[in-house]
Amino acid sequence: MFFDSFAEFLAMGKHGFYVWLCYGITALVIIANILAPIRQRKKLIEQQTRLQRREKKNASEA
Amino acid sequence: MWEALKRLYHRMGSPKWFYEISARWLPWFAIPAALCMIVGTVWGLAFAPADYQQGNSFRIIYIHVPAAILAQSAYAMMAIAGAIFLIWRMKMAAWVAASIAPIGASFCFIALMTGAIWGKPTWGTWWVWDARLTSMLLLLFLYFGVMALQKAMDTEDTAAKAGAILSLVGLVNIPIIKYSVEWWNTLHQPATLKLTEESTMAMDMLIPLLIMIVGFYLLFATLIFMRTRNQVLWHERKKNWVKKLIQAQAER
């Protein structure tokens, strides 16, 4: 470990604000990029399932 | 060798084949990506020594440089996928290009943001119209332009074509970004990593950076797979194999 204490690690020698802000923004952007396709997939499958049910219903009524 | 490549190319053109194989490939990219990024971040933040000039703010390099490298290579890959779509009319290539655009834009945004935040303690300013910074900002706008075109047109086919053409035109910006620090030596420092020469960086600073770059590339591959799989499901939703797949999902 480069730092002597956890407090020093957080402080980053006066640069804590800049360093942690960068890592925070990056983490947020990466998480958003992982969640977006997962949500999109869920939505797509739900929507197609609904469509299939409706088609089935229509077919049985006709 | 040539025959094998040709076979792979034809298979890649098959959405069903891609969908099935990518499910198996995904964990082999996602898990190493997470491992590399965790190891690289902890090493870079807590164990690498501080820079003798910049102090601890230099630790921003572990996300800034990988994000910047990836923003550029993602753009080149998007343009190549666009060219494959234009020349051989391979639909999968257009879907891959559409998957890459938002991911590349995200990495470009990370590179610009972390660069600005790093600039404040190092240069005393968030932003200057330095050649490197300006050409990276242009790259972000190119990404936005390509994304807008991919969604804009009347039919999906013309939209994909327009996006591909803009991404190919914008390709001239990539060498400009690369050589900007040499042609106009204003503020941004020259490259730390060079393929042909030995790096100017100390080993215990360099190794975590290389790990982070590998991690970012693996994450990028993972995200492309995830997005392209959705593209396949959407575009092939009327095909029998997707209908069956959706049915199986609903029954679970």
Image (cartoon, coloured by chain):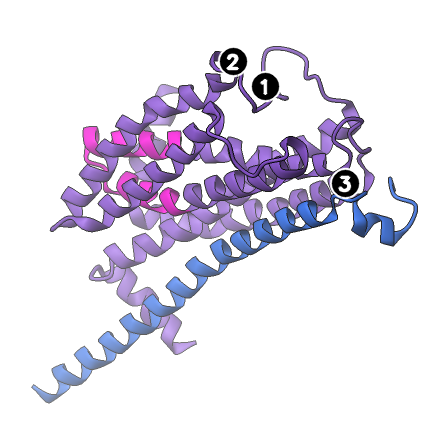
Which residue is disc 2 drawn over? B182
Q: Looking at the image, which residue is at 55% across and 51% down?
A: B27
Left or right, residue B96 beside residue A3: left
Disc assigned to residue B176: none
Which chain is purple in the picture? Answer: B
Residue B106 versus residue A40: which sits nearer the camera?
B106
Above or below residue B160? Residue B122 is above
* Residue type for callout 3: Trp
**Mark 2 or mark 3, earlier in chain:** 3
Q: Residue furthest bottom?
A: A61
User: Where's residue B90, x and y in %?
Assistant: 23, 37
Front tag of 2 and 3: 2
Which residue is disc 1 drawn over? B190
Q: Looking at the image, which residue is at 47% across and 19% down?
A: B180
**Mark 1 or mark 2, earlier in chain:** 2
Q: Is the Cβ of the residue at disc 1 closer than 8 Å to that at disc 2?
A: yes
Residue B232 versus residue A32: which sits nearer the camera?
A32
Picture colour for chain A: blue
